[in-house]
Amino acid sequence: MFNTTTPYKQVFSAIPAPVIILDTHGHFAFANKAAYKILPTCIPLSDGVSCTPPDWLAVEIDRFLKHQKDEHTFEHCLQLDTDDRHIQFTLTRLDQDKQQSGILITLHDISRHKRAEQALRLSEERYRMLVEHQSDLVVRVDTDGRLQFASPSFCMVFGIDEEHLVGRELCPIINNSGQGMMKEAMKRLDCYPTSCYYEINSQTLDGPRWIGWAMKGVVDEKGKIEAIVGIGRDITDRKKAEKEILQLAHYDTLTGLPNRSLLHDRLSQAITLSSRNGSSLAVLFLDLDRFKHVNDAFGHQIGDLLLQEVSRRLNSCVRATDTVARIGGDEFVIILSSLVKCSQAGSVASKIINAMSHPFQLGGHELYSGVSVGVALFPADGTDVDTLLKHADIAMYQAKECGRGTFKFFSPDHNEKMVQRMQLEQALRRAIENQELFLDYQPQIDNATGAITGVEALVRWNHPQLGLLQPGLFISIAEDTGLIIPLGEWVLRTACHQAKAWQRAGHRQLRMAVNISPRQFQQRGLMPMIDTILQETGCDPKTLELELTETTLMDNPDEAAALLKALKRRGISLAIDDFGTGYSSLSHLKHFPIDRLKIDRSFINDLTRSPEDGAIVEAIIAMAHRLHLEAVAEGVEYRDQCTMLHNWGCTTSQGFLFSRPLPAPDLTSLLASGQNNVALPIALAP
């Protein structure tokens, strides 16, 4: 039996470690103060009194004695009133006189270690749960770029099992083009070890996908990087959105061509390159001829198809290094860079004009839309983006003035004319509001009686600085800019008001002729506008005559015929103006509900001196009779012209022989004076 009076007791009582001694029967024989302190209630200790150990301890003691080991260690959780305490027990044999005299139990409180271990285990479980179930890709690689760990999401995306990934290089897996990524990442993290970021296009099981990789260095106790942890996220949708935003910002959505913004950037780069290598470049400014007519007649869908086909033809006319851009509406700009000779720009412009001259087959329609081209050269015509574009634009307008379907190089003289044109355009926009426009009326005379049977309304502009301007100076500007729409509406309303005034004065049969421009005729709101004006003014539709050119009617004969029939149903009479100068098709002409053909003044001028013009006029009059139409001659200035026209059967004439265009008050006075005849009847002429 262990003698607790031996020096052991003194020794064990003095040591700070908790110690319990069991006698040879396995009962508590001794416990030092540290043991009492750590085991206050859970083990029945009583100094000097032999106590039986609890069952859980008795089992461990029996196991220790049975196996006859020198030492036995186990752990047990003691449930105390305040807290659970994890204790590590170590059992050691005590020998006295070479005989086993008891068992020494040393205790070690490992509660703090257990709690840390539990927290670590929970943390690891949470980390693994996050890694295994998140969609982001997680990898850990060593300093050589070889995988030490890959998350299930990474394995799934690239279709490789984890056991086949460990030890392999990361870069060849995610993308061969990213081979240098890890070396670069190591350098960057060595200098600034927080993180770095890469975007790599990887070939995955689902095809090419963009993945953004955030890399962070793992440092050892010396602060050196021992590994890199990477978190990858699929950013394909973001990259696609960025591309779409870039496309919207720099490219035309309809044609896919560079827009104005990208054009400026590329032209700036081309200028820099040409300045460096001493070469030339050309800027071609293009505007489609008659595009607005196509858009108005066939609708925006056909107009969009036309713009797309034009874009394809333009690209086919230039080199891959050149730029074709759409800058809005029907305007395009082409940059021809690195030109050896300036004449190359003219060759390309001619090629473009030829390509555009062929018909377009769109939506079941055969359409024609030529192009006018202006050319500006670097450095002769400008050394910066804005100047080159402005001068090419001016040259384009010069090409339009020369008959369209052609090209012109920029000239300083053109610039001055363009400035004047722009000033006139700005003034025209204010002219209606400022009441600077007015109408004159030129009588139309019955060749047989000399009576005034009608008048033609002719617009005039009393410019505050330039004085009286004839229509030839501003109507083309109004047509090109769209101002012809409000201008034409004002002319029709003013003429109808005046016609109603003459009707009240008793001139009920006096016909009022008003010109309708091509752009007016093609606007979809023409018929409602005419109905509104007739209702507002009270003008009798039977006294209104609308004059249209051959070209206007032939742009879209079927739609033109339908609109003309609608006008005829309202009682409005119709005339073809400037007949003989367009390209009328007689097969279409016979289907138009036309009342009169107005023979162009160019044939009347030399009527008595040119047999050819005489033959044309006589043929037109004969054709009019066959089609049951009335022939009206414009620009009659001499009596012998009037005599020939009357002899051929021309019923009506208009010109200076009878009267110049008159202001409404003067013509009102003429009508009120009873002077119905402004010229002697042909039959009574000497």
Image (spheres, rainbow, N blue to C red):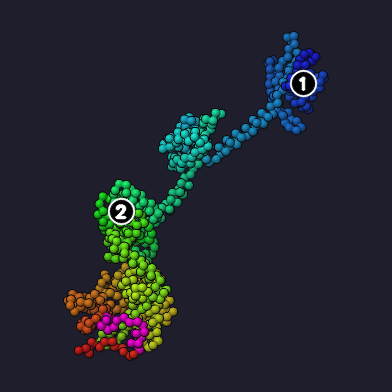
- Indicate the position of residue 72 as horizontal and vertical percent values: 68, 19
Tell me the SS state at disc 2: strand
Please indicate whether residue 640 sits to the left or right of residue 493 in the image. Answer: left
Residue at image mark 2: 378
Crowding near the residue tagged with mark 2, few <14, some 14–19, many ≥20 C-alpha atoms within 10 Å: many
Outermost residue, right direction?
A: 49
Q: Earlier in the sequence, mark 2 or mark 1?
A: 1
Q: Residue at x 33, y 67 (%)?
A: 420
Would you place residue 142 above or below residue 499 in this image?
A: above
Q: Looking at the picture, which amino acid does disc 1 mark?
A: Asn
| Quarter holding residue 393 | bottom left
Would you place residue 8 above or below residue 608 in this image?
A: above
Crowding near the residue tagged with mark 1, few <14, some 14–19, many ≥20 C-alpha atoms within 10 Å: many
Tell me the SS state at disc 1: loop
* Cα distance between the residues tagged 2 and 1: 104 Å
Any part of residue 577 in sight: yes
Residue at image mark 1: 32
Please indicate whether residue 158 sits to the left or right of residue 341 in the image. Answer: right
Q: Residue at x 44, y 49 (%)?
A: 243
